[in-house]
Image (cartoon, grey):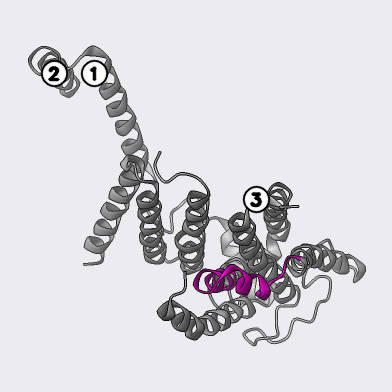
Amino acid sequence: MLYALAAIFIIILTLFLRFIMGVDSRTLVTLYLLGFIIFLLSFTVAEMPTFGSLDNPAFNEVPRRYLEQGVEETGAVNIISSVIIDYRAFDTLGEATVLFVAIAAVVATLRSH
Amino acid sequence: MEDQITRITSRLVVPFIQVYGIYIILHGHLSPGGSFSGGAIFGASLVLVALSFNLEAGSKQIPHNAASVLESGGALGYLITGLVAIALGGYYLSNKAAGFPMGEAGSLFSAGAIFIITLFVGIKVASTIATLFYYIIEGEK
Amino acid sequence: MIEILNILLLLFLIVCAVGVAYIRDLLSAVILFSSFGLIMAIIWQQLSAPDVAMVEAALGTGVVSLLLIAAISKTRRTE
């Protein structure tokens, strides 16, 4: 019932835009494509888990271990710092390497002499 | 551009920005922030000097030779800290397992390798931002 | 009350993002982009990520717009 109503609404809207408002068919296709993408994105956002909820799939035993034993295992009170520089230190090494490569490229390109 | 107001204001403000950046780098394991944020703030203060005075005064703060030494030194220090962990008998870049001095949790000199690595990466990020700006603004003359 | 503030911030964010895409003057686009970064920093703070907010306020608002202005001063101001 709802789908039929939606289909009728879309058909009437199409006819209205095409023949009464005088929108050409290219613009119409673009509009419908954009509307479809907006619908998909809003649907995805509506299905996402609640922000900061305890039932999130991301809140499993790994962050629980970090929160409970992070201070004892790394000695850092700031849990974020203990994750990015101790547990995931190799990741941060890659990040620092990216910075180093970027500045090396800039210096090699822009050096005046 | 020679403007009295921006010169005097930045002369007053720049030391405070630099102290704030150093504070964030040094307290990376205690409070929000860390190497990247503190380095970005410190580098922005170096850029502010070049903007409010002129390019020569800014380049005097961090010459090109010193900038390349700081860049490579920061990255090398990170790598060497990881290798020291192997030499002390842990995995690469391990902290407590390698036996770095942990100190008391919550004090300034604690957390072993985290403190050292934060310092190195902070120096590296600060010099990256300043060098990027100076090279782009100098360009091809 | 906090929800109203968050919705207002998100609206400002969308307006800034669309404005950056629409505006023809590159210098105005850079200034709009830096205001985008400032609002984004406040939103990170609202999402309880103060360290990301600090990086965004220093890098996204200050340094990136400075680098873009430097690039504009080397090239042309309009598209």
Q: Which residue is mark 2?
A: A17
Give coordinates of residue B104: x percent, y percent: 69, 87
The amino acid at mark 3 is Glu
Circle 2 SS class: helix
**Quarter of the rendering occupied by the N terminus of chain C:** bottom left
Horizontally, residue B56 falls left or right of residue B117, namely: left
**The residue under label 2 is which amino acid type?**
Leu
Kindly report the secondary structure that dominates the magenta region of the rendered protein. helix
* Amino acid under disc 1: Leu
Instruction: Give the labeled residue for mark 3.
Output: B140
Q: Chain of mark 1?
A: A
Which residue in the structure is indicated by mark 1? Answer: A28
- Residue at mark 3 to residue at mark 2: CA–CA distance: 55 Å
Picture quadrant where residue B46 is located: bottom right
Q: Tag 1's secondary structure?
A: helix
Query: Mark 3 falls on what kind of element?
Result: loop
In the visual, does C73 lie left or right of C31? right
Q: Nearer the viewer, residue C31 or B49?
A: B49
Q: In which chain is the residue bearing label 2?
A: A
Q: Which mark is residue C59?
A: none
Q: At which x and y percent is residue B113?
A: 75, 73
Would you call the spot at circle 1 few (<14 residues within 10 Å), some (14-19), or many (20 or more)? Answer: some
Q: Residue at x 83, y 61 (%)?
A: B92
